[in-house]
Image: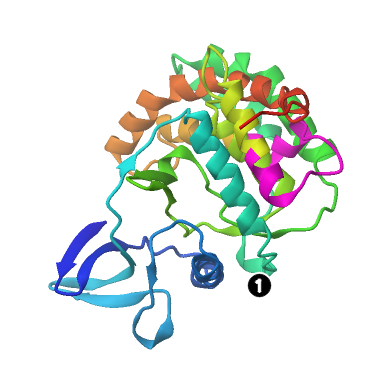
Amino acid sequence: MWRLDTELGSYAVKEMNRLDAPEWLPWLRAAWRFERAAWAAGVRMPEPVIAPGGDVVTEVPVTGGPAATVRVHRWVVAEPTSQPVRPEVGHWAGETMAELHRLTMAPEPRWAFPSGSGEQAELWPLLVEQAKVAHAPWTEDLAGLSATVKEIYRLVTVEAPRGLAEVIGHADLRAKNILLAADGPVLVDWDLACARVPREELAGCALSLAGWNRPQGMVEATARAVIDGYRRNHGDFPEPLTAVDAAGDLGVEVDWVASVARRALGDGAHGPDDVARCREILPGLIAALPNKLSAAQQLARLSTQRLCW
């Protein structure tokens, strides 16, 4: 990310990581249509800048190397926030998510978006055995997660497949993507917008913004504020949120822990620095997974409690 200052104003120029997956650009273009619709609806966000030719990205020549694929937004003067966010920021996040869901943008083409998560849960015993063979110091900690992973796998495979309608959502409304400007919060980083079931996206957002990874427990006032902000701007769901609504996000967390663990063993790592980084962050990820499941199991209680604003 660079800041580009011009006579016409300041811009954020983001270089996109080009992936080999053929669906990369169709996904980004669908996310771009959603982002522009959100901007037109008045969502607080950086103004997206249309690339020459009307596309989401453009190619910038690079001396001595391949062209860089970039996209551009108006620069926003704001400060980052951290997890857990304050309840009032959580309330804004819930209101904003409701506004995005009201756009009811169809997730098309559906094949361009990721589907499913948690496949690594079924392979967990093999991962533990791989760590054991390598004499990894965190082998017992991985094995200790087996009951947690088994319950998440049950939620993902047995409870979660309900055939609920999807819309395009931001899909990454997390503290890292909320900036605090002088006149209020701003939502950034729309590149991962994709197909989401509304109640499931709300559940994941509420848990994450409330700090579901914390050993002392999440900030329940923040989780309730996110849910309440959504209700006030969209209406209630027929049934309270439950851990089933967080199954997809929990499955992603299992997949992430497994990916980091394998790279910490050198399996699929992007060089020595990646191995070292994975070994550094893995203990924290292992410790956080049971906390996240426990937080998700509080959703039914939290989503039936009302707040006064």
Based on the picture, tell me whether residue 234 belongs to the magenta stretch: yes
Instruction: Look at the image and tell me in which quarter the N terminus lies.
Output: bottom left
The residue carrying mark 1 is 109
Instruction: Look at the image and tell me in which quarter the C terminus lies.
Output: top right
**Any part of residue 254 in sight:** no
The type of residue carrying mark 1 is: Pro
Image point (33%, 31%), residue name = 277
**Residue 306 against residue 145 in the figure, above or below:** below
Q: Which residues are magenta?
A: 229-252
Q: Position of residue 222 (x, y in %)?
A: 57, 28
Which of the two residues, 159 or 87, is positioned nearer the viewer here? 87
Q: Position of residue 38 (x, y in %)?
A: 54, 64
Image point (68%, 25%), residue name = 149
Which of the two residues, 110 or 147, is positioned nearer the viewer here? 110
Q: Position of residue 301 (x, y in %)?
A: 76, 23
Q: Quadrant of residue 280?
A: top left
Relative horizontal placement of residue 15, taking residue 39 as reference (left or right): left
